[in-house]
Every structure is written in structure tokens, then in C-alpha cells.
Image (cartoon, rainbow, N blue to C red):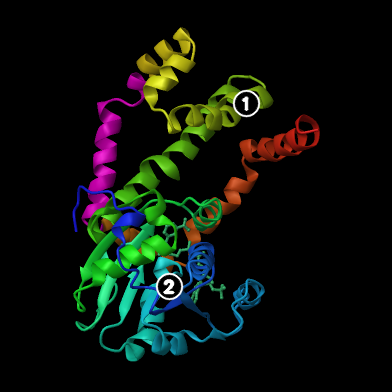
């Protein structure tokens, strides 16, 4: 296992997943995508769902006729891939998996959360590995169908059978990861960087910046529609400019005034104080206080999340979003 290497299909000498039974628990974003990719790669896949799950029909329509209970799947599978929400994994593990784990089985995670934050006590005689796709399930599936893939982060927590890495790499190949490149990480590194990236940029920073910038323009009397174009609509086009080719390409593609304003006001906005806040957020993830807060939110019945979801529906930008999507879909795409 080489931390500096990018593993591709040619590094998978023997595909040791193909002679094993892979049980997928959950048929949501990752579950459906990974199950279908594994099946298309010739792997024997079982699906395990809770009783009366609405996903049973979806999985059956996708060609998985025999859907098992989670306990039954755990008995029958060599590799058990836990693809349900992270906060549900500990009690599902306790109720349905723990007593059905036999020596030499592999537990596979797509995120390091439950392992890093010690939510589960594993028996010593199983493998515990991670193959984490760097993207949502939908894109894991669509890229696979385009003969491509999404990079995976691979980590090994317990290697009982002495071939846990080969199993992880083979699994990564079967879901399309090594078609583009899989990287070695650790459970700790994956979960800390993932939570930080979400909070700072992906689900925290970008949406907040868009909403707050839109509010400022509207509060100063500018048209919500015009504000929407610059604060929301143009974001994707700008990201597309640097996504594949870097920030230098972005600089070359925009006007001098946009580049000058971007550097000077970007530095003004995201100053040392902002950087200190980022460091504080990182330390809260590392020292477990963010996780404690999240557990309290769960115990509280997701009260904060529910109120935020309701507020989002009422935001002016969300109303403009809907209006503009309808308008753009009906007019501009004709
Ligand atoms: N989504 C992503 O973008 C992404 C990216 C990388 C890694 N991951 C990781 O992948 C894993 C799965 O995430 P996901 O987003 O794919 O999850 P998800 O779509 O929210 O999972 C939904 C599935 O989980 C089942 N489920 C929920 N609660 C359950 C319970 N208590 N008992 C049994 N089944 C239950 C649901 O069953 P029903 O059908 O019965 O409702 C459904 O089949 C997580 O570890 C996550 O961190 C996700």
C-alpha cells in the first residue's frame, strides 16, 4: 500500500471480489449505484433492506429479485457494504450484523465516520475497510455507464485475512474507482477532511456566500432577478472554468477588472479572522465537539435541521430559484 501512488485498473492483478458474495445494505444514493456497478462488473451481489422498505420495489425493478433481511444478508455475504446513513449504522450493526459476522468477513464502509468516532466495536476476526467514492451515488453510476468512474479513497482499519487491501482495491475497480484513480488514505483523514470540506466549502461556505451576497444586493434595492443571475446562476459557469484547468485558466478567461476585484476583495473578505474561524471549525471536528453537537441534534429529533429546512423554502432566493428554473426551462431551452 503506497500513500503516494494513484492506483488504476492495471494495479488490480487478481480481482478477489469476483469470487466473493457482496452484500449491500441500503439502496439509496450509494447503495443503488455501487450495487449496479458491482453487478455490471460480474460480481455476485445481494441486497439487504429493512422490512417494508420502499426501496425493495426499486431494487427489484433494477433486477435484484431476491431482497434479503439485513440479518440474512449478513450471514450470506463475504463482504458487507454498509450503505445506509452514518447515524443509522451503529444500531443496525448491533441489531442485525453483530451476531451474524463470521471469521474472515469484510465490513466495508464508504465513509470513515462510524469507525473514526468509535461508534462500533468490531470483533477482531473480521476485516474493516473503506472504499469512499468522491461523489454522490448518482454520479458514481452515470460515470460508470460512460466507461469512466469517480476516484475512491481507500483505507484499512483491520486486516484479519492479510488481503484486506486487495479486497478494497478490487471493490474499487468493480465500482469504477480505479478506472480514474484510487488513493490511499486513513479513516481519520477521510472523515476529518470530508466534514471540514463540507462545512467550509461544499454545503456551508458556497450556499451561505450565495445567499448572503444575494440578500445584500436585494436589501440595497437591486432587482432580485438580476441579483440571482450574478449570485446564483453564474456560479456553475465560473466553477466549470477552473474545475478542469485550474485558477490560472480562470484568470485568463475573465476580464482584468473581474480578476483585480476578485483578488483584492477576496483577500478582504477571507482575511486572517476568517482563516482563524476555519481553524476553529477544524479543531471542533478533530476534538469530537462537532460530533457531540450532532448527536445532541439527533437526540433532539433533528429540531434545528427541520426548522432550517422550513426556512429554506421561504427564502426569497429559493422563490426566485423556482421562478427562474421554470422560466429558463420553458423559454431558453426551446
Ligand atoms: N450520498 C453521498 O453523496 C455519499 C458520498 C460518499 C459516501 N457516502 C457514504 O455512503 C454511505 C451511504 O450514504 P447514502 O447517502 O447512500 O445513504 P442514503 O441514500 O441516505 O441511504 C438510504 C438507504 O438507507 C436505508 N436506511 C436508512 N435508515 C435505515 C435503517 N435504520 N435501517 C435499515 N436501512 C436504513 C434506506 O432504507 P429504505 O429504503 O427502507 O428507506 C435506504 O435504502 C454513508 O456512509 C455515506 O457517508 C455518501
Residue 50 in view (yes/no): yes
Instruction: Find the distance from the CA under tag 2 to the CA under tag 1.
Output: 39 Å
Q: Residue at left 28%, top 37%?
A: 277
Q: How many marks?
A: 2
User: In what element is the residue under mark 2?
Assistant: helix
Q: Which residue is mark 1?
A: 229
Residue 306 in picture, x, y percent from top left: 54, 58
Q: Magenta stretch containing residue 276, yes or no? A: yes
Q: Residue at left 44%, top 33%?
A: 243
In front here: 126 or 40? Answer: 40
Magenta-tinted stretch: 266-288
Q: Which residue is mark 2?
A: 88
Q: Main secondary structure of the magenta part?
A: helix
Q: Is mark 2 within 8 Å of ligand 1?
A: yes
Mark 1 neighbour density, 10 Å: few (under 14) some (14–19) many (20 or more): some
Q: Quadrant of the N terminus?
A: bottom left
Q: Residue at left 42%, top 64%?
A: 174
Amino acid at each position: 500500500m503506497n500513500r503516494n501512488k494513484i492506483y488504476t485498473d492495471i494495479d488490480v492483478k487478481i480481482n478477489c471480489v469476483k469470487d466473493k458474495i457482496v452484500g449491500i445494505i441500503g439502496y439509496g444514493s450509494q447503495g443503488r449505484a455501487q450495487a449496479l456497478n458491482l453487478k455490471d462488473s460480474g460480481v455476485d451481489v445481494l441486497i439487504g433492506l429493512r422490512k417494508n422498505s420502499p426501496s425493495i420495489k426499486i431494487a427489484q425493478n433494477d433486477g435484484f429479485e431476491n431482497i434479503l433481511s439485513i440479518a440474512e444478508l449478513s450471514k450470506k455475504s463475504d463482504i458487507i457494504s454498509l450503505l445506509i446513513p452514518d447515524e443509522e449504522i451503529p444500531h443496525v450493526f448491533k441489531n442485525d450484523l453483530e451476531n451474524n459476522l463470521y471469521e474472515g468477513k469484510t465490513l466495508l464502509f464508504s465513509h470513515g465516520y462510524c469507525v473514526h468516532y468509535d461508534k462500533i466495536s468490531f470483533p477482531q476476526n473480521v476485516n474493516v475497510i473503506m472504499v469512499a467514492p468522491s461523489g454522490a451515488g448518482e454520479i458514481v453510476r452515470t460515470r460508470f455507464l460512460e466507461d469512466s468512474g469517480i476516484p475512491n479513497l481507500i483505507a484499512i482499519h483491520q486486516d484479519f485475512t492479510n488481503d484486506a487491501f486487495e479486497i478494497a482495491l478490487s471493490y474499487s475497480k468493480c465500482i469504477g474507482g480505479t478506472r480514474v484513480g484510487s488513493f490511499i488514505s486513513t479513516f481519520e483523514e477521510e472523515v476529518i477532511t470530508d466534514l471540514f470540506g463540507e462545512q467550509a466549502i461544499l454545503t456551508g461556505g458556497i450556499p451561505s456566500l450565495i445567499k448572503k451576497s444575494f440578500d445584500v444586493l436585494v436589501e440595497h434595492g437591486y432587482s432580485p432577478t438580476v441579483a440571482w443571475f450574478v449570485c446564483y446562476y453564474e456560479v456553475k459557469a465560473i466553477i466549470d472554468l477552473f474545475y478542469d484547468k485550474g485558477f490560472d485558466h480562470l484568470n485568463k478567461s475573465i476580464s482584468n477588472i473581474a480578476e483585480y476585484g476578485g483578488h483584492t476583495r477576496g483577500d478582504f473578505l477571507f482575511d486572517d479572522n476568517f482563516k482563524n474561524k476555519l481553524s476553529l471549525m477544524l479543531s471542533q471536528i478533530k476534538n469530537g465537539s462537532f460530533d457531540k453537537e450532532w448527536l445532541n441534534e439527533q437526540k433532539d429529533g433533528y429540531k434545528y435541521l427541520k426548522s432550517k429546512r422550513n426556512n429554506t423554502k421561504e427564502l426569497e432566493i429559493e422563490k426566485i430559484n423556482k421562478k427562474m428554473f421554470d422560466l429558463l426551462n420553458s423559454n431558453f431551452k426551446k
